[in-house]
């Protein structure tokens, strides 16, 4: 893997080919094209209602675009249900936390491991033997790779809906990691976190992208310009369903149209500085 | 509901952490429970065996409903239909011309029990198919349809006529044989039900700590997120319907074997409502709740009968029963919506943490 970084960069993992989506008369996405290359962090920014989450839902399969194609590793995946897309290696977190409230942290993360387990109705009923072995293996993976990485070992037996917001966000990231995805969609992972938690989360995102263990490709939807500009390799700017531009953070920062639509006055966009 | 471990108990392997009973105190309690249910009740409380058999019957029936409503979040109001399917299937299958040696060896009835469970499971899946599209109140309607189509139409009009018009199906108790063990006295029936309950409870608990059960709970809590985590929600909903129907079918077969006679009146719509009422009283989403709810109901009726008998009222017990049950459900929804199981958990924690409850 090491020597091939240069050619790696040119591999397109996910391609949105001119996708459009409208709800009644509201055009949520109007012919968006985007190429995400393997190993990069590709951010999507835009004002509220620009269509960022709709785009995520199109990639993830909760919505199916009315026009255009979603290609993953060169294959068209438009019509696949979300669980089929998850099996291809696409994982996500949600803007408004969508954890399983009644389950413990550990069970939530175990659930992310769902696709790697093989227990069926018959072996599950007996537990002893195959199922038990499989559960212990899953537990080892979760403890060593995820709980340790995200530093949530102290809350692993807590019920999720009793946890503070920042920790819930972290658990949600853990759940998304549990099935070892190739492409991770993060829908506003920093919204509502305090400065310290933002720094932690940004570090996790960078680690996931850069560490040899994970090497994930990440699509990041975020409003915090400081973090977006620092982390991303490329940035796509949306406004009312239209793509204004797709370029490196520096190009985006200097584009007058972007400044007019979203960033506003130059001093204002760099929040939390 | 997270639980606390006492000081000094440390797990060294994950297997220990995945076990049901993690401390010696709990193991002791379980042994005590086994002694009470296997020895004390059948030998020393013989006068009340009928009540305990009823308790077993209601807990088994409610276990299936609990799985569907409490763990998978699929509302059902027609579970008596699947009990009926299981009961009728077991009676009709027993009436087949089985070879003599199989009957003598006692392998027929266990086989029939399994098959009637599976038939009821498949029947339940058929009526669970709409759950792929609808949820909540709309699903209640389709499961109510299951009740009326199965019991009031299919069984009342056709299946129950098989033995002859207006003739209830019967099953001779010497046919109910597990190997050399013939289930004919009341005590035998009690043991049969007890073992069945233990098996079914362990089955459900094992599901809940492995892949299928987690997927069900995930569907209950958040189906959109569940689907993006790679769960095929339609498949898992139908699996839940199958397991629930299977438990229902086995329960129905047990009911039939305990009575030796079944009729459509045993599986009315009211019974479906009672099954849901049990889990409301016991606690939705709790296996303990099934048993607490069933116990509450059986002993409430028993106490009512005693009281009504003492006061001297006769004949109207059926109305008092319904009124009391309705009132109990209203009371629980108002004052303890999480049911008896939650109350039990709270009081247990109070004593576990006493005197420093923070």
Image (cartoon, rainbow, N blue to C red):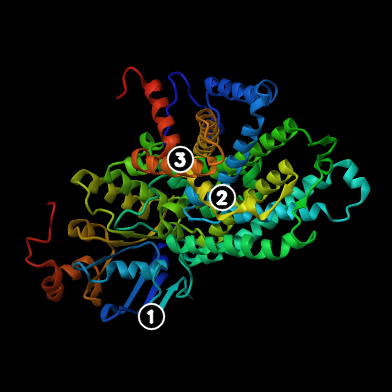
Q: Where does label 3 land, which residue?
A: B324
Q: Percent x, y for residue A222?
A: 24, 60
Q: Secondary structure at mark 3?
A: helix
Q: Percent x, y for residue A88?
A: 49, 64
Which residue is found at the position 12% from the left and 61% from the top?
A269
B89 left or right of B344?
A: right
Q: Percent x, y for residue B142?
A: 52, 64
Q: CA distance from mark 2 to mark 3?
A: 15 Å
**Relative to A193, does residue B6 appear above or below in the rendering?**
above
Which quadrant is the N terminus of chain B positioned in? top left
Q: Percent x, y for residue B211?
A: 55, 49
Q: CA distance from mark 3 to mark 1?
A: 56 Å
**Residue A265 showing in the rendered view:** yes
Which residue is found at the position 79% from the left and 36% from the top?
B184
Q: Secondary structure at mark 1?
A: loop
Chain under numbered label 3: B
Which residue is nearer to you in this view: A169 or B277?
B277
Q: Which label belongs to residue B271?
A: 2
Q: Residues within 10 Å of mark 3 (few under 14, many from 20)?
A: some
**Residue A141 showing in the rendered view:** no
Q: Where does label 1 land, which residue?
A: A66
B110 left or right of B198?
A: right
Q: Quadrant of residue B236?
A: bottom right
Q: Residues within 10 Å of mark 1 (few under 14, many from 20)?
A: few
Q: Does mark 3 fall on the same chain as mark 2?
A: yes
Which residue is found at the position 75% from the left and 52% from the top?
B90
Q: Does mark 1 fall on the same chain as mark 3?
A: no
A209 left or right of A192?
A: right
Q: Residues within 10 Å of mark 2 (few under 14, many from 20)?
A: many
In front: mark 3 or mark 1?
3
Count of picture labels: 3
């Amino acid at each position: 893997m090491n020597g091939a970084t240069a050619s790696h960069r040119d591999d397109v993992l996910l391609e949105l080919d001119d996708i459009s989506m409208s709800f009644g008369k509201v055009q949520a996405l109007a012919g968006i094209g985007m190429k995400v290359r393997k190993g990069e962090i590709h951010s999507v920014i835009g004002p509220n209602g620009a269509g960022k989450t709709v785009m995520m839902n199109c990639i993830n399969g909760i919505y199916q675009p009315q026009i255009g194609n979603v290609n993953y590793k060169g294959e068209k995946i438009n019509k696949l249900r979300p669980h089929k897309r998850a099996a291809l290696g696409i994982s996500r977190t949600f803007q408004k936390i969508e954890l399983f409230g009644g389950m413990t942290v550990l069970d939530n993360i175990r659930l992310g491991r769902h696709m790697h387990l093989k227990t069926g109705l018959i072996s599950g009923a007996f537990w002893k033997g195959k199922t038990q072995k499989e559960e212990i293996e899953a537990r080892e993976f979760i403890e060593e790779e995820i709980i340790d990485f995200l530093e949530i070992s102290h809350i692993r037996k807590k019920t999720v809906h009793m946890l503070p917001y920042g920790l819930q966000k972290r658990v949600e990231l853990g759940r998304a990691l549990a099935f070892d995805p190739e492409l991770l969609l993060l829908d506003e992972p920093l919204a509502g976190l305090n400065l310290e938690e933002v720094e932690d989360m940004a570090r996790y995102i960078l680690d996931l992208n850069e560490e040899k263990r994970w090497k994930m490709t990440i699509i990041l939807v975020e409003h915090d310009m400081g973090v977006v500009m620092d982390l991303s390799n490329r940035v796509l700017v949306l406004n009312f369903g239209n793509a204004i531009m797709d370029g490196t953070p520096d190009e985006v920062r200097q584009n007058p149209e972007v400044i007019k639509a979203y960033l506003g006055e130059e001093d204002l966009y760099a929040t939390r500085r | 509901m997270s639980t606390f471990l006492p000081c000094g108990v440390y797990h060294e392997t994950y297997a220990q952490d995945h076990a049901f009973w993690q401390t010696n105190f709990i193991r002791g309690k379980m042994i005590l429970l086994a002694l009470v249910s296997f020895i004390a009740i059948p030998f020393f409380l013989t006068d009340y065996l009928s009540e305990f058999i009823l308790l077993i019957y209601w807990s088994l029936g409610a276990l299936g409903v609990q799985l569907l409503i409490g763990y998978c979040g699929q509302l059902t109001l027609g579970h008596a239909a699947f009990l009926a399917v299981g009961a009728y299937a077991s009676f009709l299958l027993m009436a087949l011309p089985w070879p003599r040696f199989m009957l003598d060896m006692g392998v027929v009835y266990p086989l029939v029990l399994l098959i009637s469970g599976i038939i009821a499971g498949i029947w339940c899946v058929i009526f669970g198919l709409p759950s792929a599209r609808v949820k909540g109140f709309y699903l209640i309607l389709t499961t109510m349809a299951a009740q009326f189509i199965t019991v009031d139409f299919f069984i009342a009009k056709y299946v129950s006529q098989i033995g002859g018009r207006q003739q209830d199906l019967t099953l001779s108790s010497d046919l109910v044989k597990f190997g050399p063990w013939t289930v004919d006295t009341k005590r035998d029936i009690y043991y049969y039900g007890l073992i069945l309950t233990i098996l079914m409870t362990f089955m459900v608990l094992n599901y809940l700590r492995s892949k299928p059960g987690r997927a069900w709970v995930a569907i209950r809590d958040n189906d959109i997120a569940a689907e993006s985590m790679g769960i095929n929600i339609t498949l898992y909903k139908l699996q839940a319907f199958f397991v629930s129907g299977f438990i229902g079918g086995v329960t129905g077969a047990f009911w039939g074997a305990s009575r030796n006679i079944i009729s459509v009146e045993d599986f009315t719509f009211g019974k479906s409502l009672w099954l849901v009422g049990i889990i409301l009283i016991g606690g939705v989403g709790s296996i303990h709740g099934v048993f607490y709810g069933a116990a509450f109901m059986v002993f409430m009726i028993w106490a009512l009968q005693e009281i009504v008998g003492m006061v001297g009222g006769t004949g109207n017990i059926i109305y008092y029963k319904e009124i009391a049950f309705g009132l109990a459900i209203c009371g629980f929804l108002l004052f303890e919506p999480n049911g008896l199981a939650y109350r039990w958990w709270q009081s247990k924690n109070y004593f576990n943490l006493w005197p420093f409850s923070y």
